[in-house]
Image: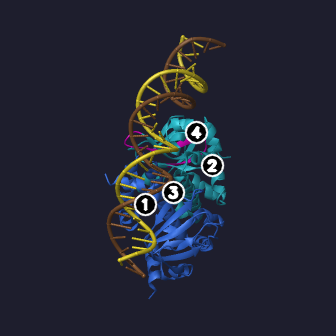
Chain colours: A blue, B cyan, C yellow, D brown
DNA sequence: CGCGCGATTGAGTAATTTCAAATCTAGTGG
DNA sequence: CCACTAGATTTGAAATTACTCAATCGCGCG
């Protein structure tokens, strides 16, 4: 019997490809396990970006801080999402983004080396990563569309449609940052 | 000797992976060639999304039209970029986006079936698509960051930095749509 | 109970949009 | 080659929207 977090990894991968127990043994060795608490930072600006993270549970925000100190949220991450400062991760540069835990949970960590090794050795895993990237690409495109929606009302409704669960569990001021408006403006939106 | 457009395809693929002539013969059969003129639509809302397109030359815009008739530009595409209505393409649904040619050029067309067949039969091609998706993902993330930048000035400068060539060859009103502001506001920005 | 954080409200200010009109430009046909 | 036209750009002014700053409210937790 595997520990719980490896069970989760297996079922996550099995959503996309079918793998044998032997193959999974090859894969699982590349992942390490961490518990993350609220307000904890997984990555901060200037850090080395050693890992990418597969979210097992909890909610996280991935964001930049602009020169005025304002936080620009690129995406939220929840169960079964992958996250890291990908520009820095892929190019092995220092982080320009932050990742902060909004709701405590657990993640699995893997290095770029691991990703590339797994993809190179197992065609199936290359396929797995391609499919996951495809989904991430589609989600980001949705995000762009949402940001371009003319009215705040539309942006908010779209957000509510896409992430009904986050609406409950994420403070409104963070949702405002995600939508790109001030918290006061968002507050006024649904008080009318 | 190959026709010109297949030479371009080969060099495009060879930027990522190394392939033999035999392998390329397998690949090239999946692509058909089209010339596109200015203002021509490759995809319109409601169409079946049969193909994805590799841009050999020219400039294209990929956009939604919202309920007010406003165009929301998700991305521009130029040489060596892939484009289509990906949400519809991957799910084989009707298009919700448009692709219009801004500057005439040529594209190669491939079906979803072709993509999946190539990726399944050649591990190298699965790798190729993964890397291209990675790049597309990073570009979209840049785009999100740009859209969240607080001031229009910043958004414009970032755009100019990323796409100096488009600045020349794309009408300003289209750049305004890309940045998410009215053309009047953009015009006022650099008249001061 | 009181502290701290998030959410709300108000007022004044700044930025952007909209609508209308004028100007400029590139491409077309005579 | 020139005149013409459609489209693109610019400008102005009013209206709208969102932002900032400050104060207040509400609630969970020590």
Distance Cα–Cα, label 4 vs label 2:
18 Å
Distance Cα–Cα, label 2 vs label 1:
28 Å
Residue D11 position (above or below residue C1):
above
The residue at which mark 1 appears reads as A175
A175 or B103, nearer to the observer: A175
The residue at which mark 3 appears reads as B115
Q: Residues within 10 Å of mark 1 (few under 14, many from 20)?
A: many
Distance Cα–Cα, label 3 vs label 4:
43 Å
The residue at which mark 2 appears reads as B162
Which percent across, then down, holds residue B137?
54, 58
Figure quadrant of residue C7: bottom left
The residue at which mark 4 appears reads as B189
Distance Cα–Cα, label 2 vs label 3:
29 Å
Which percent across, then down, holds residue A177?
47, 58
Which is closer to the viewer, label 3 or label 1?
1
Chain that bears disc 2: B
Distance Cα–Cα, label 3 vs label 1:
37 Å
A38 or A95, nearer to the observer: A38
Tell whether position A51 is magenta: no
Find the magenta span and give its range: B52-69
Q: Are marks 3 and 4 on the same chain?
A: yes
Which SS does the magenta portion mostly show?
A: strand
């Amino acid at each position: 019997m595997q520990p719980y977090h490896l069970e989760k990894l297996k079922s996550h991968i099995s959503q996309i490809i079918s793998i044998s127990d032997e193959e999974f043994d090859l894969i699982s060795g590349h992942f390490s396990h961490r518990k993350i608490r609220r307000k904890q930072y997984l990555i901060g600006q200037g850090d080395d970006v050693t890992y990418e993270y597969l979210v097992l549970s909890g909610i996280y925000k991935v964001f930049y801080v602009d020169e005025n100190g304002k936080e620009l949220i690129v995406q939220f991450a929840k169960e079964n999402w992958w996250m890291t400062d990908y520009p820095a991760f892929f190019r092995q540069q220092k982080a320009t983004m932050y990742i902060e835990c909004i709701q405590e949970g657990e993640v699995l960590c893997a290095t770029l080396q691991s990703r590339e090794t797994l993809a190179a050795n197992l065609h199936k895993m290359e396929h797995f990563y391609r499919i996951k990237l495809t989904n991430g690409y589609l989600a980001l495109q949705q995000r762009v569309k949402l940001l371009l929606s003319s009215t705040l009302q539309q942006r908010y409704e779209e957000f509510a449609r896409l992430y009904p669960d986050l609406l409950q569990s994420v403070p409104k001021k963070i949702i405002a940052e995600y939508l790109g408006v001030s918290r006061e403006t968002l507050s006024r939106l649904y008080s009318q």
